[in-house]
Amino acid sequence: MSEHNGVLDCRPSISGKIAFITGGFGGIGRECVTALLAHGANVAFTYVDGKESEKAVEKMVAEYPNRISAHKLDLRYFESIKSCMAEVIDRWGRIDILINNAAVGSATVSAFSDDPEAQDSIMLTINADGTLKTCQLFLKHMADSLATHPLKIINFSSVGGGIGTFPGFRLSDGMSKAAVAALTRQLAAELTSTKVDVFAICPGATNTKMFQASTLNHLSADERQAFEQSMPKNRLIHPAEIANIVIFLASSYSTPLHGAIIDASMGLGVRPGLATEQKH
């Protein structure tokens, strides 16, 4: 960053940057990978072994063999996080942009257990502790660059837990997302004297497979239409819209927002009653 005639020259390019995104195979994560590549970044993304198609992952990597890499990650286990991070550093030499996107929701956590109590623990472990451990390892690996090299940490929370509360929202889900927002604030407070910028994005009702599984798939066609009409702007958020926010945060333009918990819900965070209000 330089200054010319009193105006800061903050070119937002992320070309040549190394981005590491957890959960980059589907939904918002997949759109983030696509957007990062389109803006010139090289991307390492993770997937869950045995729960996502190995052939589909290989096909995704084959499209950009010199600019993308795929890595197995199970956020339930510290050793998996540790080995994955080391593998990414070994492949690319560094990480400039860390995007903690991987998470489970109230419906998708059932892929790990049928027991409700176990599901709660798994959700807290993956969403909260997994994000914590990934941030800690990232800062440890990049310790020599914190004061000299611009770095970004972009965490994913949710409008539920990260911004507001919604009746009926699963307790462990909301707790895990609130923990991510708290982690983001704490890291931001501790890193103000470094080149590391830290943010959290809190999406609202976004049209992903996770949201479909938790909410939309239980509705009839008429009920789904009514639900979408009840949402802000009378529609769901598109995953690509959230990915565009990620691109902005990954750029040099975002530094003044260091520590921000970003409400990306199109207004649901400031008017949570839309989820239950009956329009007459």
Image (cartoon, helix red, strand yellow):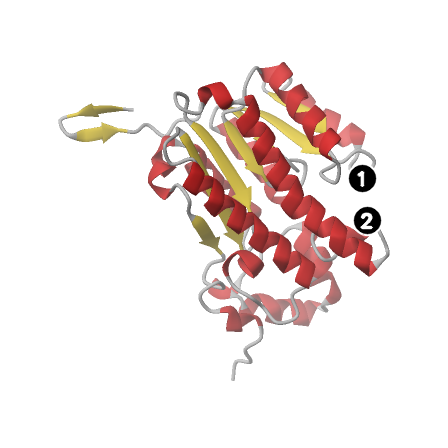
Give the Cα separation between the discs numbered 1 and 2.
8 Å
Disc sitting over residue 205 in the figure: none
Binning the other alpha carbons within 10 Å of mark 2 as few (below 14), some (14 to 19) or many (20 upward) gives few
Residue at far left of view: 5
Residue 95 position by quadrant: top right
Residue at far bottom of view: 280
Secondary structure of the residue carrying numbered label 1: loop
Secondary structure of the residue carrying numbered label 2: helix
Q: Position of residue 202 (x, y in %)?
A: 52, 52
Q: How many marks?
A: 2
Please say whether residue 6 is visible from this viewpoint.
Answer: yes
Q: Are marks 1 and 2 in contact (CB under 8 Å)?
A: yes
Q: Amino acid at mark 1?
A: Lys
Q: Position of residue 48 (x, y in %)?
A: 76, 36
Q: Residue at x 52, y 50 (%)?
A: 181
Give whichever of 78, 271 is nearer the camera.
Answer: 78
* First along the sequence among labels 1 and 2: 1
Vertical position of residue 222 compared to residue 81: above or below: below
Q: Residue at x 52, y 73 (%)?
A: 273
Give whichever of 102, 228 is nearer the camera.
Answer: 102
Q: Residue at x 79, y 28 (%)?
A: 55
Residue at far front of view: 190
Residue 25 position by quadrant: top right
Q: Position of residue 220 (x, y in %)?
A: 72, 69
Q: Is residue 107 left or right of residue 130?
A: right
Disc sitting over residue 111 in the figure: 2
Q: Position of residue 117 (x, y in %)?
A: 80, 59
Rendered-image quadrant of the N terminus: top left
Residue at far right of view: 114
Q: Label 1 belongs to which residue? A: 51
Q: Amino acid at mark 2?
A: Ala
Q: Is residue 170 left or right of residue 51?
A: left
